Image (cartoon, rainbow, N blue to C red):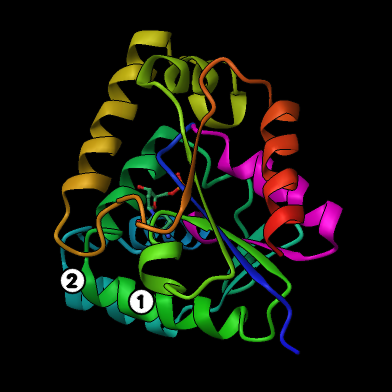
Amino acid sequence: MKRPIIAIDGPSGAGKGTVARTISEKLGYRHIDTGAMYRAVGWKANLERIALDDEPAVAELAARARIVVEGGVVSIDGHDITRAIRSPEIDRAAAAVARLPRVRQILVQRQRKEAEAGGVVMEGRDIGTVVFPDADLKIYLDASPEERARRRAVDPAHSGRTAGHAAVAEAIDARDWSDTTRTASPLTLASDAVRIDTTGLSIQEVVDRVMKIVTERL
Ligand code: DC
């Protein structure tokens, strides 16, 4: 029997990364961060000075790039970009390339292939709606925009060294707007997803809630 696929979706700063990683460790599943794939494409497009709205060129890049997201390490064509992709510049680049339908098509295909065998916790924006509409369990993590900006501002991996709270809040707003209003697979709550509002909850509390749902449903 195929092992389960757990989809975790939600906006930036809702805690998806930490929660998905912790849950996958507890279950002995693989953790696949699909946002890192869009970040990798945005990073490489910048490196090659390709305009982020040049859909044929970015899609061609995505099609030929070898992107590996495994065990917390992200690489593209053999370059370790784990740290380089966590910057305000790449936040913007990733959101821009994620708007391009042909790029999404290529990455979605790879995501499906990677998770073929199951035993996976996959996090992103469209996992429960597009990548795996038949996922065994769909979790949608949310939090108020203020709380998400607060979390990002104190997370050096995301805020950049000089970003103040106002700058982070503004960047989060811009990304929310881009992620929810784009035509191609916008971020939405799947009808059969369990939504958890993590505002005011610790990571441990969120993990406990998700694990309870996993135990009940799988
Ligand atoms: O989760 P993240 O912040 O690393 O994602 C980076 C960008 O990629 C963000 O703008 C949302 C987008 N994304 C997406 O459109 N679909 C996914 N499955 C994952 C991320």
The amino acid marked with disc number 2 is: Glu
Relative to residue 199, is residue 15 depicted above or below? below
Label number found at residue 166: none
Query: Where the N terminus falls, by quadrant?
Result: bottom right
Q: Badge 2 local density, few (<14 within 10 Å), some, or many (20+)?
A: some
199 lies left or right of 190: right
Residue on which the image places disc 2: 55
Residue on which the image places disc 1: 61
> Looking at the magenta stretch, what is its main secondary structure?
helix
The answer to whether residue 16 is seen in the rendering is yes
Q: Nearer the viewer, residue 113 or 157?
A: 113
Question: Does the magenta portion include 34?
Answer: yes
Identify the residue shown where x is 37% and y is 38%: 89
Residue 163: which quarter of the image? top left
56 lies left or right of 202: left
Identify the residue shown where x is 48% and y is 31%: 13
Q: Nearer the viewer, residue 215 or 55?
A: 215
Which contiguous range is marked in magenta? 14-35
> Residue 180 appears at what percent x and percent y?
23, 46
Identify the residue shown where x is 54% and y is 79%: 66
Query: Where the C terminus falls, by quadrant?
Result: bottom right
Callout 1: SS: helix
> Residue 15 appears at what percent x and percent y?
57, 35
